[in-house]
Amino acid sequence: MAKIIGFECSRCGDTLPPQAAPTICPKDGGPLYVRYDLAEIRRNATCESVINGPKSMWRYAAVLPDAEPVTLGEGLTPMLPSRKYPKLLIKDEGLNPTGSFKARGMSAAITMARHYGLKKLAAPSAGNAGGALAAYAAAAGLEAHIFMPKDVPIANRLEVEAASAHLTLVDGLISDCGRMVAERKDNEGWFDVSTLREPFRVEGKKTMGYEVAEQMGWTLPDAILYPTGGGVGLIGMWKAFEEMEALGWIEAGKRPKMICVQSDGCAPIPKALHEGKAASEMWQDAHTLAAGLRVPKAYGDFIILNIVRRSGGTAVAVSDDAIMAGVKELASTEGIFACPEGGAALAAYQQLLDDGFFKSGDRVVLFNTGSGYKYLDTFATYWGVDAFVPKAKLPASRSIGGIIGPY
């Protein structure tokens, strides 16, 4: 495992020395990146050495913090070739513990929270992050306080309650949940593990980038389609590519185009990108069936926009109808029951094919970020399925001794 040599501000570039429980840059509030001595790691680890590691994201321990992991077996998810699109690969994060990619970030964040001796954690969530926080906090013996919009998918609410975390349902959006955490954390003694308010969820999410490279023989695709709410996964993968280039694990200068996918009911990143802005504006009246994309303004929006531009990528907004059609297609042609966010990524892929952004030979990785089983109420409502059909009334029992079968 890697020794942390400091933390670098993503906004001003200032370097902070190693410290317990880091949060954000004290100068300008910029999210912090964990920094390691990559030259030393390069001398002691090779990309081939990861095959001897565990069958989880902790196989990349050489580039993860030196602490005893809190793990439920997250990571090393399959990357499946599409049956319909010859050059498309589907990275199925729905097979993680707690059913989504959020398991990676929370595994790393809870690992370091326990390492630093923290006891009480708090975060807002549109759904899956809350479930992951509840599960990993339970595994670590820590207290979790989770704030969710009251219309969160029922599976997310139930998994939080099952793990005995403290749940507050909020009449509002994830931004309202985040404000409540910020207002109460100091008085309550909570450590805030919100998106980009601490640096280790990025470390967990960056393992998606390492896995893509490993599963493609230590090469990278031409493009990555990523459903983007808070954007930690996109930010983490870009950090992984930077590290792998420095380590000599991949060829320098061959990074993929990063494609940010959002819903047209909440599309602050596409709007800011196409207007040439460095940061997004708060999206008014945010609404979409893809709960994970209903983020009116990401804390790291300026980082996301910079990555998209540097990579030569783009940002796409798709309709809820296109999202649900994408879910149906992934299930019916690929056998993958995807979350709405995964459906959004497929809708964006189809749009970019039609627009000519993707060429016929482009190798593209599409991320399905969660399992469709966590959105049964969303799908049932959209498709007009009665998800709560009353149980059929059974016939009254008849005491006929010695007879088994219909009567």
Image (cartoon, rainbow, N blue to C red):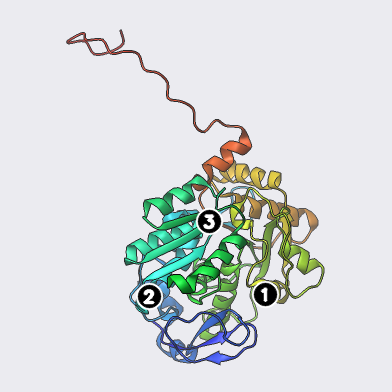
| For the residues bearing labels 3 and 2, Cβ distance under 8 angstroms | no
For mark 2, what is the residue?
Answer: 118
The answer to whether residue 109 of the structure is visible from this angle is yes
Point out residue 250 in the picture as x, y percentages from the top left corner: 55, 78
Q: Amino acid at mark 2?
A: Leu
- 183 versus 317 height, above or below: below
Labels 2, 1: front one = 2
Q: Earlier in the sequence, mark 1 or mark 3?
A: 3
Residue at 47% from the left image edge and 90% from the top image edge:
37
- 145 versus 63 height, above or below: above
Q: Amino acid at mark 3?
A: Met
For mark 1, what is the residue?
Answer: 307
- 150 versus 111 height, above or below: above
Q: Residue furthest front?
A: 187
The numbered mark at residue 148 is 3
Q: Earlier in the sequence, mark 3 or mark 2?
A: 2
Labels 1, 3: front one = 3
Q: Alpha-carbon neighbours of circle 3 within 10 Å: few (<14), some, or many (≥20)?
A: many
Of residues 166 and 367, the one drawn nearer to the viewer in this rendering:
166
